[in-house]
Each structure stands twice: as structure tokens, then as C-alpha cells.
Image (cartoon, rainbow, N blue to C red):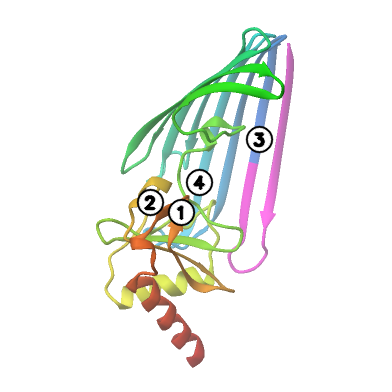
Amino acid sequence: MERGVGATVIEEGGELRPTSNLYTELYVEFIKGFKGKVSYNRWHGFDGSAEIFDFYTYPNIFAELSVENRLAKVRIQGRIRDWRTFRQIYAYGYDMEFNATGKLKGYFRILNVNEETEARATVYARVSYDVGYKAELFAEYGNGYDSDNLVNTDGFVTEGTSSTAFILDAEGMLRTQPLGPQILHGVTRRAVLRLARQESLRIAERPFTVEEAYRAREAFMTAASAFVLPIIEIDGHKIGGGAPGPVARAFRQLYIEEARKS
């Protein structure tokens, strides 16, 4: 039996609102091909959302058990994000890869995600056969995205490296991810939310999925370099008829006017 334990504490920023991030994990190999892993991550910092607007701690727990031999690899994973907080999300999943003959291969995955407003399950399966000459026949079902950490792909839109995503959903609610360990405290994001409140627009700092973005009335991103940039198409799906919507255009104009005043 082999064990491995690691722990890291990272202090991020030393200004008025410093944050800290603790990460520790335990790795165990029971016998050859039979492995387990448990990790714990805790982010502590200032949460600028309307619900908190104070320093807050968000713990995350992850566990995995895997079995592997020359024919197949099976993984079972579970994760609780923002554990024991009002933003708690938990996910669990199972996947299996198999190599039956060297030419006949397959993959199967099932994933379940639960959060405060909705729960959803996804299934994906693929079978392929190598016919030679660098060609293969295959059949698949479901969404073919893949992830090294199965349950860390929960379908929520977060943000870009320097931008924030917004949608005006089918009910007319302006939605963006809440601030916390997954989201940076962008200046443009904060300005757009302030303008939205001034315009009496309904706002929900709540996660949304890619599928919800497909169905949205409008979608746009904010960034210091792009201000407010309308999004008219996602993965081939036209948003709002394929043209910039009135809310995104209004926000862009308001933001530019506010910037000129300062």
C-alpha cells in the first residue's frame, strides 16, 4: 500500500482584501491498479456579492476511486463545491473506458449535478472500431465533452481569463456567476451591475449553464479592454435572433458615458 499526502497554503494579495487558499490531498494505492484519492480545498476571502459583502470561506471536497487493468479503467468520483454554504453544489459521476480487442474500444459516462435551483443528469457513450488504413467506425450518444476530472465539469459558465459572462435569460433576469473563489472581482463587472440596478433591471448572481445561454434573450461579456461586448452566437446557436440585443447595447452606451465623466 502506498500513501501520499500534500498540503499547500497560498496567500493571494496583500492589500485591503487579502485571500488565502488551502489545498491538501491524500492519495492511496491499495494494490496495483486500485487507487483512491481525497482532496480538500478551502478558499477564504472577500465575497463582494449582495448576499454576503464580507469575508467568507468556501470549502471544496473531492474524492475518487479508480480501478484499472489492461482491458478497462473505471472511475467513480464525487465533489462538493462551496460545502455547507448557501451556494453548495454537489456532483457525482461514473465513467468507464474499455479496450475489448485492440480494435473495438468504448467509453461510457454518467454525471449528476445538483445545485440550489436545478438538478441535471447527463449520459454519454461511444463505441468505435478500427477498420485500418487510419479509419474507424464509431457510434456515440450524448454530449462528447471530456474532462480529466469528471465531476469538475459541471456545465456552469464561469468566466474568461480577463472577462465576465452575462446572460439575460428567458425570463428577463440578468444573470452572472456570483463572486467567490471561481470568479474575479472585475471592475467592469461591478460597474455593469451597478448600472443594471440603476435601470431597475432584475438581477440574479446565480450560475447558468451553456444550455441556458443558448436559450437566453441576450448574452454579453464585460472586460476592461472590451467594455460591454454583445455575444450573438454560441456553438452555432444564434442568441436573440443573431443580433446585439437592446440591453447589451444600452449597457455599452451607459458604460462609455460613465467612463467619459470620470
Left/right placement of residue 237 relative to residue 137 reads: left
Q: In this figure, which residue is indicated by the disc labeled 3? A: 24
Q: Earlier in the sequence, mark 2 or mark 3?
A: 3
Q: Which of marks 2 and 3 is in front?
A: 2
Callout 1 touching callout 2 (CB < 8 Å): yes
Callout 3 touching callout 4 (CB < 8 Å): no
Residue, x 42% and y 82% (percent of image)?
A: 253
Q: How far apart are marks 3 and 4 (CA)?
A: 15 Å
- Considering every residue shown, the one lying at the far bottom of the view is 261
Q: In this figure, which residue is indicated by the disc labeled 1? A: 234
Callout 4 touching callout 1 (CB < 8 Å): no
Left/right placement of residue 53 relative to residue 7 reads: left
Q: In this figure, which residue is indicated by the disc labeled 2? A: 214
- Mark 3 residue element: strand
Which residues, given as a range, are shown in magenta?
A: 1-22
Percent position of residue 87, x then y: 40, 46
- Label 2 sits on what residue type? Tyr
Quadrant location of residue 193? bottom left
Q: How far apart are marks 4 and 1 (CA)?
A: 31 Å
Is residue 109 placed above or below 1 in the rendered structure? below
Percent position of residue 139, x then y: 50, 22
